[in-house]
Image: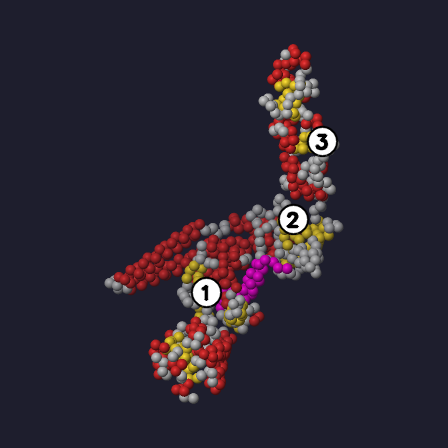
């Protein structure tokens, strides 16, 4: 079918899209001819009859791969316009420019077929709605996808073949550079860089963990070399934990060439989009692993030792090796195992002195049901294992003392050597900036001022580094004197003094134990009150011993008996909250030394089967509080308190600190009246009539020699005393 017959007026009324794409930024920069050819398709669209203002170029996807449409905003925009029926022609140099996979390509074909949109390339125009054109376009899409597969296979095959020979040049870690020959890897020529790397590998066996090496660098204020693929020049920065960890775990430093440590896999995210992620592979699945490929900083055996130590410096897992050495006085942390089930024992601390102990966490391990194995204090066991350990290492104490002497001196010199190299590096940079400044023409002040500033900065850095180096050299610890060496050798003869010295921390002791001990299996025999220990050394030798455990003669924890008896008496009259207040006012405490609460009183009652307070009632009268008694008698509570203090009425108090209670009887009610009876006079009149003092009258009322009532209404309320008629007549 000719082009004139395919293009209809309806097509020319819509826009013509010219799709432009290059896969990478390098292609956009260097393959200029291909880019110009794609932009030249605009003239072809105009030749086919589209006006210039209706031809639109879609070039947002330059430097984007055509393997998928996730990152191609231009392709997504074009698909949307085609679906809306606004496009009459989609023009590209070839099918592979539009899409490299059939899913995107056939989606475009389906939309173009529905919306009557034409597709054009360098060979001609096609109508996706026609069977023959659709068949041809489908074959072209398949070929574009196959072409991408072939290109990838060739590239990956070449990369894998070169990597298998150890000649593929990839990014190298800091401390290495590529040589001139194929696959040649050399150490960095800068001694400051190699010195920092060597220091890391020298300090790790002594300090035992990545974190301790990192903290050592920070304490010495040593800079760390940083290198990236984008910036080949070394940049000196403050070290980070991850930088130290990356050096200690990279096999390149052991002279090994590796390739294929990771793989890329696709997955569907929560939005239904296809994503890619990088997954690390175990060493057994690495594609290339070449020993002794280049000269490393350490040998392979040392690298394996470092990886084994780092893997142990984690939280311990059941049936796995011990974890990192942590704080605490339990010496067998990570070494003790259960004699019944074989699990690693966990550590606990209890008591005022935080005494260590070990227990087996075999809960929920057998058919989901708890299984108790053992729980034992660790002080006696730790002491026995420590004595066995000291007895075993005593012959090697002298050799260890000499090694410690060398380590002390080496530690003093390591940081100082790094600072000396830093001074040398700053001196070189200052001299280099000086040569640059001297080489510039004096008239070119724009450049001269910049170089002068750089020179001054370098000189300042050099001066600061020299001052710091001299300070550290002056304050650094001197080498051991012959007298100090003699003391160290003397201590080796009595290693127990070193072990029990206050300066030897539990962490140091655990470090020593885990160096030689592999496992301490503990079996507890409560019948004979002993613990059977099986000590397995890393030399595969086994040592068994029995340890006598402390007797469990401590009395059971329980509340004092007099407190229990008091609660039993109080529960008849008071609620749990009131009882708790009474006990606290008497400074009584629970068995664990806590203050009493209503809940704790209730638990104590229920444990000793003490009935709960159910209210007071008696034939002799109701027992009520002072406030309630005051309301019933129509007086103030202070009046009741005063009568109690004066002894006019009787009150009940079960124990000191308990609230007073009044028993409401008819006799008590008769003493509180609204109007004074015949023969009763006020206190003032009674003093005159009887010719005695007020206190004497009160004492006679308490003794029952005089009768008194309380009048609560009238002009004169208060206490009224009964006098005889004869006494009134005399008055």
Residue 132 disc label:
none
Instruction: Specify start and end residues of the magenta stretch as a single range.
Output: 295-318
For label 1, the SS is loop
* Residue pointed to by mark 3: 621
- Does residue 140 sit above or below 268 in this rendering? below
- Does residue 468 sit above or below 65 in this rendering? above
* Residue pointed to by mark 1: 174
Quadrant placement of the N terminus: bottom left
- Lower sequence index among marks 2 and 3: 2
Is residue 355 something that shows in the picture?
no
Residue situated furthest top in the rendering: 730
Magenta span includes 297:
yes
Tell me what residue is drawn at x 47 percent, y 71 percent: 70
x then y, percent, for residue 296:
49, 67
Quadrant placement of the C terminus: top right
Is residue 518 something that shows in the picture?
yes
């Amino acid at each position: 079918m000719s082009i004139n017959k395919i293009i209809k007026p309806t097509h020319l009324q819509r826009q013509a899209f010219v799709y432009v794409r290059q896969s990478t930024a390098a292609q956009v920069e260097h393959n200029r001819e291909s880019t110009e050819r794609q932009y030249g398709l605009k003239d072809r669209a105009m030749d086919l009859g589209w006006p210039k203002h209706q031809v639109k170029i879609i070039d947002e996807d330059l430097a984007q791969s055509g393997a998928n449409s996730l990152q191609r905003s231009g392709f997504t925009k074009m698909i949307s316009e085609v679906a809306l029926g606004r496009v009459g022609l989609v023009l590209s140099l070839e099918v592979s420019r539009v899409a490299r996979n059939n899913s995107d390509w056939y989606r475009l074909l389906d939309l173009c077929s529905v919306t009557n949109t034409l597709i054009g390339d360098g060979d001609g125009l096609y109508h996706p709605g026609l069977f023959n054109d659709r068949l041809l376009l489908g074959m072209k899409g398949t070929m574009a996808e196959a072409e991408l597969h072939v290109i990838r296979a060739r590239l990956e095959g070449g990369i894998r073949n070169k990597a298998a020979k150890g000649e593929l040049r990839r990014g190298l870690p800091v401390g290495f550079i590529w040589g001139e020959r194929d696959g040649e890897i050399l150490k960095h020529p800068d001694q400051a860089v190699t010195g920092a790397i060597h220091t890391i590998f020298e300090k790790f066996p002594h300090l035992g963990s990545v974190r301790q090496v990192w903290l050592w660098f920070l304490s010495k204020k040593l800079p760390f070399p940083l290198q990236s693929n984008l910036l080949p020049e070394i940049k000196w920065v403050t070290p980070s934990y991850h930088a130290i960890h990356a050096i200690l775990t990279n096999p390149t430093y052991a002279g090994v060439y590796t390739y294929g440590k990771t793989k890329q896999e696709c997955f569907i995210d929560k939005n239904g989009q296809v994503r890619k992620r990088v997954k690390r592979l175990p060493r057994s699945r690495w594609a290339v692993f070449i020993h002794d490929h280049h000269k490393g900083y350490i040998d392979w055996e040392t690298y394996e030792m470092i990886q084994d130590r780092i893997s142990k410096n984690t939280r311990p897992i059941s049936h796995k090796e011990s974890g990192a050495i942590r704080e605490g006085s339990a010496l067998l942390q990570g070494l003790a195992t259960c004699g019944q089930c074989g699990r690693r024992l966990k550590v606990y601390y209890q008591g005022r002195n935080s005494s260590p102990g070990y227990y087996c966490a075999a809960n929920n391990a057998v058919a989901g049901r708890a299984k108790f194995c053992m729980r034992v204090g660790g002080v006696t066991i730790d002491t026995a294992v420590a004595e066995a350990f000291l007895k075993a290492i005593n012959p090697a104490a002298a050799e260890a003392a000499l090694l410690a002497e060398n380590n002390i001196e080496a530690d003093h010199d390591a940081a100082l050597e790094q600072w000396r190299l830093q001074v040398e590096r700053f001196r070189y940079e200052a001299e280099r900036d000086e040569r640059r400044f001297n080489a510039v023409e004096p008239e070119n002040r724009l450049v001269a001022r910049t170089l002068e500033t750089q020179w001054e900065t370098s000189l300042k850095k050099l001066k600061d580094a020299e001052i710091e180096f001299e300070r550290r050299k002056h304050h650094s610890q001197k080498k051991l004197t012959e007298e100090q060496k003699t003391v160290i050798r003397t201590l080796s003869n009595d290693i127990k003094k070193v072990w029990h010295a206050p300066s030897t921390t539990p962490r140091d002791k655990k470090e020593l134990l885990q160096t030689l001990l592999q496992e301490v299996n503990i079996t507890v025999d409560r019948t004979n009150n002993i613990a059977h220990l099986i000590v397995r050394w890393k030399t595969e030798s086994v040592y068994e011993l029995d340890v006598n455990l402390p007797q469990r003669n401590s009395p059971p924890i329980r509340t004092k008996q007099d407190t229990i008896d008091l609660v039993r008496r109080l529960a008849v009259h008071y609620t749990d909250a009131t009882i708790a207040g009474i006990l606290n006012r008497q400074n009584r405490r629970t068995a664990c030394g806590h203050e009493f609460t209503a809940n704790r009183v209730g638990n104590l009652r229920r444990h000793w089967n003490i009935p709960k307070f159910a209210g007071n009632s008696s034939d002799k009268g109701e027992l009520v509080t002072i406030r309630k008694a005051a309301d019933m008698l129509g007086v103030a509570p202070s009046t009741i308190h005063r009568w109690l203090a004066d002894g006019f009425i009787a009150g009940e108090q079960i124990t000191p600190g308990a609230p007073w209670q009044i028993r409401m009887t008819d006799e008590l009610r008769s003493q509180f009246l609204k109007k004074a009876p015949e023969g009763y006079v006020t206190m003032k009149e009674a003093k005159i009539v009887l010719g005695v003092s007020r206190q004497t009258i009160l004492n006679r009322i308490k003794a029952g020699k005089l009768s008194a009532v309380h009048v609560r209404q009238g002009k004169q309320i208060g206490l009224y005393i009964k006098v005889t008629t004869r006494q009134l007549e005399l008055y």
